[in-house]
Amino acid sequence: MGDMDIIERLGNETSVFEGRLVKVHKLDVTLPDGRPALREVVRHPGASAVVPVDGDGMVTMVKQFRTAVGKVLLEVPAGKLDSKDEDRLLAAKRELREETGLSAENWIHLTDIVTTPGFCDERISIYLATGLTRGETDPDEDEFLNVEKMPLSELVAMAMRGEISDSKTLIGLLMADRRLRGE
């Protein structure tokens, strides 16, 4: 069976809920065997994330309480796009400055990830930032976070021990480590 044989065909799409962050839509699809099915999809504008690594191999991380999982998570700086059309690199630069006060001279796009493709269309672009300079933070008014610097090698070890659970952070740290090693 080829990929074309497993594609669902989209029919009607209806908005069920529109919030500040996400929209929930109901999609009527036709399955590959011709039967109808219902899909519920969360529409998200997307986000950008940054792995900021200084010349000493230290990564500036953020800790923030995540209500959805009920705990404080250690994460790379990140934030949602203002719209689906926003330039992802510019959003990454904005989020790095707002959350950490840092700006970077060098930017490398590491990858784009789809976070939960079973029900959500969110796509996060992940960047490696080097050549860092410090400035002032400017977090969103409802954003409370702690900023910490940690060695990239220690963060990779934590990731491999299962001590970091945020997917964008895991992928970003591991890819940044490989890229900085020249792999």
Image (cartoon, grey):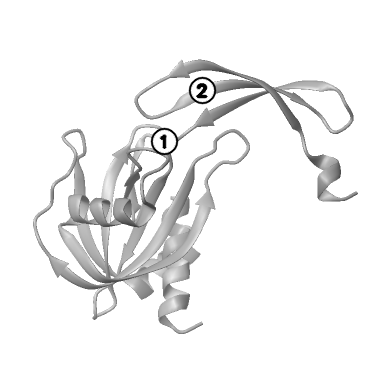
Task: Identify residue type, mark 2.
Answer: Val
Residue neighbourhood size for the residue with mark 2, other residues' Cα within 10 Å, grouped as few (<14), some (14–19), many (≥20): some
Residue 32: which numbered mark, if any?
Answer: none
| Gap in angstroms between the C-alphas marked 2 and 1 | 20 Å
Residue 165 in view, yes or no: no
Give x and y (percent) for residue 75.
34, 53
Specify whether 118 is left or right of 33. left
Task: Identify residue type, mark 1.
Answer: Val
Judge whether 72 appears above or below 162 on screen.
above
At numbered mark 1, what does the secondary structure look like: helix, strand or loop?
loop
Q: How many marks?
A: 2
Specify whether 104 is left or right of 133. right
Q: Are marks 2 and 1 in contact (CB under 8 Å)?
A: no
Name the residue that disc number 2 marks: 24
Judge whether 121 appears above or below 151 on screen.
above
Specify whether 70 is left or right of 59. right
Residue 13 in view, yes or no: yes
Residue closest to the eye, 68 or 113: 113
Residue closest to the eye, 119 or 60: 119
